[in-house]
Amino acid sequence: MSKRAYSGAGIFDGERLHAGKTLLAEDGVFNAVIDAGAVPDGYEVTDLGGGALMPAFVDLQVNGGGGVMFNDETNVDGIVAIARAHATTGTGALLPTLITDTPERTAAAVDAVEAAIGRGVPGILGIHLEGPHLSITRKGAHDPALIRPMQDRDEAFLRAAAERLPNIMVTVAPENVSTDQIARLAGAGVIVSIGHTDCSFEQAEAAFAAGARCVTHLFNAMSQMGNREPGLVGATLKAAGVSAGLIADGIHVHPASMRAALDSKMPPGDIFLVTDAMSTVGSDITEFRLNGRRVLRHDGRLTLEDGTLAGADLDFATAISVLVEKVGLDPARAYAMATSAPAAVLSDARGFGSFSPGKPLNAIHLDHRGRPCPLAAG
């Protein structure tokens, strides 16, 4: 039996940041957090030398990584390459995300994720389908030729997919999906997220009442908060029980806007981090193609040739540093936004996002420079 004790770093368990404590693990399974001077006999002690020990990151919006876009390599090999690239940045669990595409490619994506889970590909928790039932006016980098209203066959496909996968998240716009469809999808176990929409405050509230419980990349590609029309941003911050993803690179959203949203979000429900990562994560490529269009990588941005943002060139360690250093957030809340908060949105987090006695220790260490590395707990 392997018994290991980790000390010398703050320990974030998914809820609290503990100082002066030691984490115990046996055979790669979390045991307890104890006082630093109370390690039982038989444990091999590792001094981490500062930083923070925490659950591996959970990312609900991953379009690509390792030079691969999920839309282009919609197969198990593509998923493996993406997951491996993100593991190097501290992400232990993720939803491969398919950007608006054809029905055939969407079906292939669900098949690929089901096969990857069946083969035990580490960290694959389900799928996120971002489109095609979005608003043309808020399409962002999505191909407008592929955007369309949800039909009965689309709904039936999604409900069937929810029976096959532990988690299926779908980003939709109220302009192209009815509240009845949202209610039926939510009832079938689909995580319905509202995004890429110009909906009104009232339309957003109706979608939440029907069962949508998430919002895709808050502030981006959605109706904004105004003095007489609060839009989707205002509805999201007001809605209890609704969570929202946030791209915290300091490019997609200004730090002051992040701070205002974080200060005003109504619980339960929280704001959590997403990378919205493209194929550039874990790769030195400078450009790639999205639905046949050229995407350029420069100065931390990914854009179409017309300047439209096309996903993000971001990892969670960078996002956490933005939250702490530029937004002024307490580190414990920033850590939660990358771990327990996204895990809480899932139907089945499969033990990720927090430390629980008897569960596998899916952990990373952020060193004193904020660089993540997996923890060898076996």
Image (cartoon, helix red, strand yellow):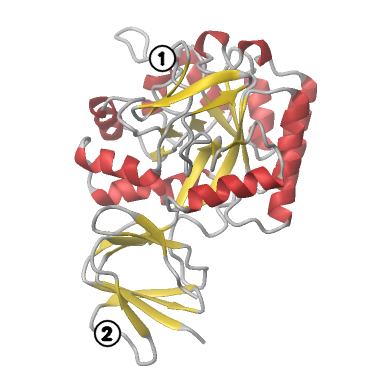
> In front: 209, or 243?
243
Q: Residues within 10 Å of mark 1 (few under 14, many from 20)?
A: many
In this picture, residue 123 sits left or right of residue 7? right
Residue underneath mark 1? 231
The image position of residue 217, as x and y in percent, is: 44, 28
* Label 1: which secondary element: helix
In this picture, residue 2 sits left or right of residue 101? left
Vertical comparison of 84 with 273: above or below: below
The image position of residue 215, as x and y in percent, is: 48, 29
* Label 2: which secondary element: loop
Q: Residues within 10 Å of mark 2 (few under 14, many from 20)?
A: few
Residue underneath mark 2? 38
Based on the displayed image, in which of its 4 quarters is residue 53 positioned?
Answer: bottom left
Based on the displayed image, in which of its 4 quarters is residue 329 positioned?
Answer: top left
Q: Residue at x 48, y 63 (%)?
A: 362
Q: Is residue 25 visible?
A: yes
> In front: 352, or 356?
352
The image position of residue 63, as x and y in percent, is: 55, 35
